[in-house]
Amino acid sequence: GESVGLHLPTLSVQEGDNSIINCAYSNSASDYFIWYKQESGKGPQFIIDIRSNMDKRQGQRVTVLLNKTVKHLSLQIAATQPGDSAVYFCAENWGTGRRALTFGSGTRLQVQP
Amino acid sequence: GAVVSQHPSRVICKSGTSVKIECRSLDFQATTMFWYRQFPKQSLMLMATSNEGSKATYEQGVEKDKFLINHASLTLSTLTVTSAHPEDSSFYICSARDPGGDSSTDTQYFGPGTRLTVL
């Protein structure tokens, strides 16, 4: 299930199921998007990125979909494993020269064994 | 992927002291590094952009005299929290931009973070 409130939204899935984590971005000028995984007490770990001239990109067990029309980004994780439990952030980048990332609010993924 | 290190990983200090945090790119040269701050259960907030050989660019609301940034080389940026107070307690994370072969989109790699606790 999913809960929204003062804490991070949480997505709970069973081990082996597929997970879909969603992200809405606000800047229509954004041209580069990244998904990061952050485990407790650690820095964000790069998962996959996509440029605005693409609508889908696949990695190992992960797929990122980009819908520029509605400014929506999703991360699909296939055959979710307990080690996938973490907080996932989407980040967007725009502008020439500055290259600063803006992070989304994050989603906590809990994988039930 | 590229590796970014941070030191120290944890620091506890008394109120009023200054703390220096180092961020290093280990296997690439980073002309630009970024410093973020993260409170519990919240997202990362950009504090400043550190450019090698020039002054850092601070985000609105971030005191440049409070958070001193020095990017003296292509592999090292430091963040010094001056006269730290309990409200400065947070998780500080740096990232480095790996220019790669495409200047239009650059992947950022993050350090492991530094947990600062000010008593």
Image: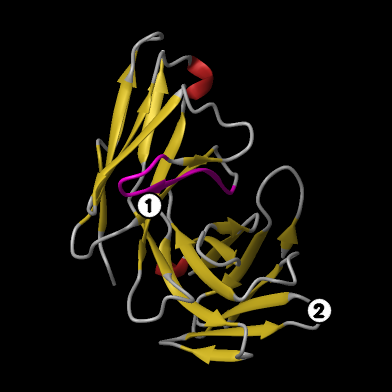
Q: Check residue A1 for magenta coloring.
A: no
Q: Check residue B45 for magenta coloring.
A: yes
Return the residue found at the far left: B27
Measured as percent of width and height from the top left, residue A35 is found at 52, 70
Measured as percent of width and height from the top left, residue B61 is found at 63, 31
Q: Residue at x 29, y 72 (%)?
A: B1
Q: Secondary structure at mark 2?
A: loop
Tell me if I can see residue A67 in this picture: yes
Q: Are discs 1 and 2 located on one and the same chain?
A: no
Measured as percent of width and height from the top left, residue A67 is found at 72, 84
Label 1 and label 2: CA atoms lie apart by 31 Å
Return the residue found at the far right: A70
The crowding category of the residue bearing disc 2, from other C-alpha atoms within 10 Å (few below 14, some 14 to 19, many at least 20), is: few
Decide: is A34 above or below A58.
Answer: above
Q: Residue at x 70, y 71 (%)?
A: A29
Which scheme is used to colour this image of the protein? secondary structure
Decide: is A14 above or below A107.
Answer: below
Residue type highlighted by circle 2: Val
Residue type highlighted by circle 1: Met
The answer to whether residue B28 is left or right of residue B52 is: left
Q: Which quadrant: the C terminus of chain B?
A: top left
Q: Secondary structure at mark 1?
A: strand
Badge 1 is on which residue? B33
Residues drawn in magenta: B43-55
Badge 2 is on which residue? A70
The crowding category of the residue bearing disc 1, from other C-alpha atoms within 10 Å (few below 14, some 14 to 19, many at least 20), is: many
